[in-house]
Each structure stands twice: as structure tokens, then as C-alpha cells.
Amino acid sequence: MEIKVVKKVLDANDEMARQNREMFKEKGVFVLNVMSSPGSGKTATLVKTLGRIMPDIKCAVIVGDICTTNDADRLATTGAPVVQINTDAFGGDCHLAAHVIKKAAQGLDLDSIDLLIIENVGNLVCPAEFDMGENARVVILSVTEGEDKPVKYPLMFRVCDAALLNKIDLLPYLDFDIEEAKGYIQKVHPEIDIFEISARTEHGFDKWIEWLKEKIVW
Amino acid sequence: MEIKVVKKVLDANDEMARQNREMFKEKGVFVLNVMSSPGSGKTATLVKTLGRIMPDIKCAVIVGDICTTNDADRLATTGAPVVQINTDAFGGDCHLAAHVIKKAAQGLDLDSIDLLIIENVGNLVCPAEFDMGENARVVILSVTEGEDKPVKYPLMFRVCDAALLNKIDLLPYLDFDIEEAKGYIQKVHPEIDIFEISARTEHGFDKWIEWLKEKIVW
């Protein structure tokens, strides 16, 4: 009974995600869904990413949090239009979903956007289950979180096109085996692209930005 | 309609949590629910905590993960009986709930346990909503996650009796303002007890263990 209800919600979400994808395609907007645990560095990574690709690529951001506009405030410093979604208005939801993105997109001038980045709610579980009509998905894993997260939260790594191993400037101070972590990521998703980055120092950003630019060509 | 379904699930959970709490009380078992984001150091903190309080206090652990028995394997090295719950058997659930704990408790000899620790699924959102019949709740926040998590995920900090600021051995290498973080925690929950710890060096463990020991007296 409970499973049926969940299935119905997911089916409805998938149908709306399909509509979103069609709408974004018509407008020539490429949509990137960025996910991670809380505090893995989504906002910091995106601020630095936007600094490197704008204004050549016209960007906008939809950012989801349960509460606060902290992330939107930081992202707005890049000059990109930002729509903040506080999911406490939707019952404190632990993820963004297609209907929320549809509504948020109404606050953006899609004709003047090449790349729409969705910064999801910080959560390594639930967001992986909700398609929003995006064209690519990226997961960020901070090296402070331990090597085994990909095998403990496999769906997240399975649905993503790239994994960014962030905060590698902290590696000298951690007991973190980066090759072991990469091995776990490849174990759950052999075709995924993996980048080592530091949003603080911008180490590894050249390759990540190159990947992103190649990806967003329609 | 959807909200009604969610309410029904939560009501059923609350009723079962009440039954669990009664059962644990009859057996003289104090139950502690430990929650955090993925990779904040729940398992490492618990391994060191068990090492300090066992065998004076007879402990057991129920540990929830979507996949793998990694955490159970680490916890078992302490000599405590450990029950691993893999929520992928329950639909990949992002949290533990009362019915799961009831079932897991059947695998433990409650008569010989003083303290049952529940290590929840790594998630700063959903586990805060599900009472399991515990007597106290602790949230772990790693200082690598940024200062503003308490205001972005307020429910988690509101439902907990103590907050452990973990990995403080990394503070010299981070741009983390610990007083700001504490201020945010107190803003959402003024009565909460806050401890600065490092599960790696055991810095701050004396005070945390003292708090825990005082708490578990029936």
C-alpha cells in the first residue's frame, strides 16, 4: 500500500520531468543537477565554476535548501540570476522535484540562458531518486567524508555523469586513500568521469571546466 | 492527499515508537539515537566512545546504512553486539524508523544491555522526523561541513539533546569559525549541549563521556 503511493508520486514526477526537459530543450537551456551531502562544497564549487564560464556561457542557478538564503546570497555574487527554493514551504522536503523546478523556472528568462544549474538540497540519498528534467548530473564528495560513501550510497553515484572529489587541499591532513575512493566510485558506476578538485584553491578546475563545456553543447 | 498519507505514516511510526520506548524501559535499556550527514564521523566517534564506557556500561549498537556492513564491521571490533540494518531491504530508505528498530531489537539480548546506541543513516534531514523510541538524541557536525548547517537543517538540531562538533583537529587547516557555528546551533536550540571533539585524537572526549554517563542513568 505504502509502496504504491510512493510509486504514484515518482510516476507523476517522471512525467513532469519529461515536460521540463522538453521545455528546456525548446529554449536551448542545458540543465545540470548538482548533488552532495551537506557541506561537501556545492556552493563553493559553483561560485568558482560560474566565475570561469561566465559571461561566455550565460548561466542561471536554482538552489534548494530547507531553510535560509545563504547559498543564494553567495551564488548571486557571481552575477548569475539565482532563484532560491526553501523546501520548508513544501513540507521541509529533503530533495528538489520536477514540479518545484517547473515553478522556479517561471522566475527566469529562459531565452537568455545557456546553462541552468540546479544546486540540490544537501542529501546523498533522496535527491538521487527525483528526475527534474536535467541533462546531466554531478555528485560532489568531499575527501573529509571517507572513502566508502560510494558503496554506502550507490544510487547517487550510479545516476551521476561525473563525480567531483572536492577539498583535496586537505588530503595531507586526512587519513583518506583517494585511489580507494575512486575504486569504490568506479565499482558502482564504471563509466562515470571523476575529477579531483579543490573549490578553495581551484586545483583541478581546468579539467572539470573542460568536461562541463563539452557536455553543455547541444 | 499526499500530506494525509505522510501524516498517517508518521502517526503509525509514533505509536510504534511509544511501544518501543515502553519495551526498552521495562528492560532497563537506555537508547541513544546518533545522527549526522554522511561522513561526519558517527562510526569513528562511537568506536572511541564504546572503548571508553565498556565494559562498565553494557552496550549494543544498531547501525543503519542503505548498503554495506562497513560500519557494523568497525563497531564490532569494540566487542559490542552489533545489528546492521541495510535499508535497501526496506526500499532504500533514507532513515531508520520505529518498526525497523523493533525488528532489529529482537536480535539482541536486551536483558544484558544498559545502553543501546542507534547509528542512523547518514542524512541531516529525514532521520530527524522519525522517533524510534529513543531516550536521547545526538547530532554530529563535522567542522569540515561549514558553520551554517544548523540554520539550514534546523529540525535536526532542534530535536537533539547534544551536538558534537567533530574533527576539530582539522581546524588549523579550515576556514571554519567555531564560535559562529556554536552561535547558529544555539540560535535554533538554545538548551542544547555542545561539545568540541575529535574522534581521531579523542580531544574533548572526557566531557562528552561524562555527559553521556550522566544521561543514561534511569
Image (tube, coloured by chain):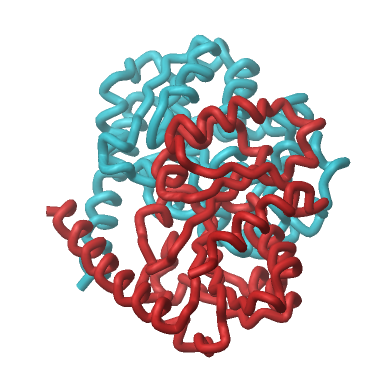
Chain colours: A cyan, B red
Residue B125: percent from the left, percent from the top?
A: 43, 48
Residue at 39% of width from left, 43% of height from top? B155
Determine the image quadrant of residue B119. Answer: bottom right
Image mark count: 0
- The answer to which of B205 and A18 lies nearer the viewer is B205
Please state the horizontal and vertical placement of residue B104, each as a whole percent of the image.
46, 81
**The N terminus of chain A: image quadrant:** bottom left
Which residue is painted at 54% across and 73% down in the image? B116
Residue A57, relative to residue B137: is it above or below? above
Front position in the image: A28 or A119: A119
Near-viewer residue (A33 or B54): B54
Residue B205 is at least partly visible in this image: yes
Instruction: Indicate whether A154 appears above or below A48.
Output: below
Question: x%, y% of residue B181?
Answer: 59, 31
Snapshot quadrant of residue A182: bottom right
Q: Residue at x 51, y 73 (%)?
A: B86
* A165 left or right, relative to A137: right
Vertical position of residue B43 compared to residue A19: above or below: below
Residue sitting at x 75%, y 60% = A183
